[in-house]
Each structure stands twice: as C-alpha cells, then as structure tokens.
Amino acid sequence: MFRYVFGPVPSRRLGKSLGVNVVPLKYCNFNCVYCQLGRTRHVINDLRMFYPPEDIIKEMEVAVRSRNYDYLTFIGDGEPTLYAGLGKLIQWARNNQDRPLAILTNGAKLIDEEVRSWLSELDVVKVSTDAGSERTFRLINRPHREITFDRFIEGIERFREVFSGQIWTEVMLVKGINDNEEEMERIGEALRRYRPDRVYMMVPTRPPAEPWVKPPTSDVLVSLAKVLSRYVNSDRIFIIDYIERGEFHIDKNDPVNSLLGILKVQPMTVEQVMDVIRRNNLDMEILDRIRSLTKEVVFNGITYLVYSSE
C-alpha cells in the first residue's frame, strides 16, 4: 500500500499526473477561502521534516517503474514547499526517471533562497496569484502573519530570474472578492513583474473551505480574461471552469486506500468514484465503504465525497 504516492490522476494542466504527497493534511502557510481541503488547521511558515525522505523515495522507485504518467508532480495535503526533505526528493526524481517534474505550490516560500534552489531543478512550477493588493491577499488567501503581498510577489520574481523552466500561474476567482476589473488590473501588474509562461484563470469547482464562496459567472470570467490580456499575451491565458475528466489510477489490490489517497488531495464526485469502481471490475460495495470514511458535500448541484481526518 502506498502512503505518499498516488495516481496517476487526470489533471486539467498536467495530463496524467503521478502525485507525490509530502505534507500532512492542512499544514499550510495560506488558509484560502476556496481551498478544496477545508480550512487550514496548522498555519505555519517554517520548514519541517514531516516524513522520512527515504520512505517516500521507496514508493517513488516502485511507482515510476510501474505506472504510465505524463508528469511527476509534487503536491501536499497542505503546502509542499514546507517539507524540509523536498530538495532530496526532487534530486532523486531528476536522476532516476525521465518524465517532466512539476510542483503545485502557492509560491510563498520562494522568498527563501534554499527553496528557490530546490525548485530550480523542476520543469514546471505552478504558483498562485489570486490577488493584486495586500487587502485582497488577506481576504482570499489569508496567509501566515509573516507573509506580505509584496514579499510574496518578490519571491516569485527572484525565482523567475534563476529558473529556466516554466512558471504557470493559477488565478482563482471568487465572486465578490477578486472578480472585478480593478482587482484584475492589479493582478495583471503583479504578473507583469514575474512574467508567467501560462496563466490559468479558474473558479472553484469543488466544495470550498468557506460555504459562502461562489464562482463568478462564465461571462464575468471571459471579460476579466480580456482585462488580463493587457498585461499577459492572450495566447498564454487559459480559462478553466470545469472539473477534471479522465481516468483515475488505483491499486486494484487495495482500492479503498488508493481512493482515499486521491481524496486526501482532491475531492471526487460520486460519479467519478463509481466510474473507477466499474472500470476496475470491483464490487460496488466499495462505494459504501468510501462513503463511510468521507462526507458528502453538494456544491453547484454536484455531490462530492470529501476526505476529513476529523
């Protein structure tokens, strides 16, 4: 049974993504209102050795030989750059497999030179820029008290200077907070500072941390993309307002724990779980077991299974 490696899972940005989960649930330096994993229970901003790197490498050794994937992606149940062993894992992956390496990070730890050094070995670094001002940054991302908006953007700027790979930016739009032209102008100014290779304009598609969070409408999304194109070439802007489509890989010998491994990093719809069970010719009673270990949440009329350690 794998504890740290999961998938591959379908990714809206990375195709078939083989995930490496390096941070326990909800240890993060942000507490984003839209987070699909719920509220951050441990708001930290220091590096910690959550798990022995050797244990994660053992799983990676097996997975990279036995699974078909497009990207090897470092991720966390919280913020992956808070893991003190991350540099060692990235170096192992660079030397022992030939697929592109990516990380899904909020980008706040890029202000640290050591973290910039680790991530410079990757092919794709996905950061977040959901705000263009300190006020909106505090409203939507609710960062650790040490993190200011200017220092956050400065860290990504410094990384851009030394990184030869691609920086992809995710802009998550929340109705009533950052879905207006004035804030999008400010976000554009921030993006201009570090020149991302791609910008993904997104809306919450899974149950968010705060029940009041709603996505803006599609026409608002399109109009804000036009505003952003004043700062970033339009061919680098992508609108994503749908959930992932594609096959989720699980271990047929341990389907319940395999599904839970995915659910720890992203909620799945009931239909997605049923599809996994059918494709693998498994007993549908597995759905009942998964339901007993998760909670059902309805968001935008769709029922999701959400993992909770509580």
Image (spheres, helix red, strand yellow):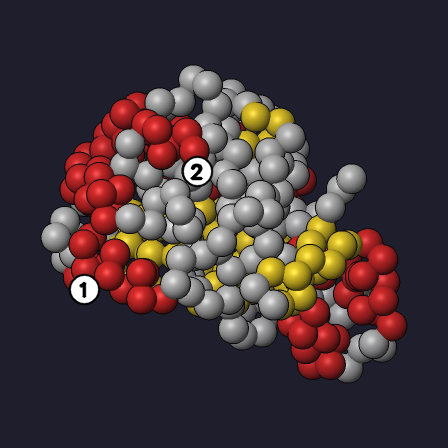
Marks counted in the figure total 2
Q: In this view, does 234 lie to the left or right of 215?
A: left
Task: Where is residue 260? Give x, y as percent.
Answer: 73, 56
Task: Where is residue 255? Give x, y as percent.
Answer: 77, 65
Mark 1, residue position: 235
- Residue 24 visible to the viewer: yes
| Residue ID at (25%, 56%) | 224
Which residue is at the front of the view, 292 or 227? 227
- Residue 125 visible to the viewer: no
> Image quadrant of residue 270?
bottom right
Q: In this view, does 122 lie above or below 229?
A: above
Answer whether labels 2 and 1 touch (C-beta < 8 Å).
no
Which residue is at the front of the view, 24 or 172? 172
Mark 2, residue position: 140
Task: Where is residue 183? Give x, y as percent.
Answer: 26, 42
For the N terminus, which image quadrant? bottom right
| Residue ID at (37%, 33%) | 137
Q: Which amino acid does label 2 sit on?
A: Ile
Marks 2 and 1, the one that precedes in the sequence = 2
> Image quadrant of residue 271?
bottom right
| Residue ID at (33%, 39%) | 131
Q: In this view, does 226 lie to the left or right of 49?
A: left
Category of crowding for the residue at label 1, using alpha-carbon neighbours closer than 10 angstroms: few (below 14), some (14–19), many (at least 20): few
| Residue ID at (36%, 66%) | 218
Q: Which amino acid does label 1 sit on?
A: Asp
For the C terminus, which image quadrant? top right
Category of crowding for the residue at label 2, using alpha-carbon neighbours closer than 10 angstroms: few (below 14), some (14–19), many (at least 20): many
Q: Is residue 8 left or right of residue 55?
A: left
Which residue is at the front of the view, 108 or 177? 177
Residues at marks 2 and 1, CA–CA distance in whole angstroms = 27 Å
Task: Where is residue 83? Give x, y as percent.
Answer: 54, 31
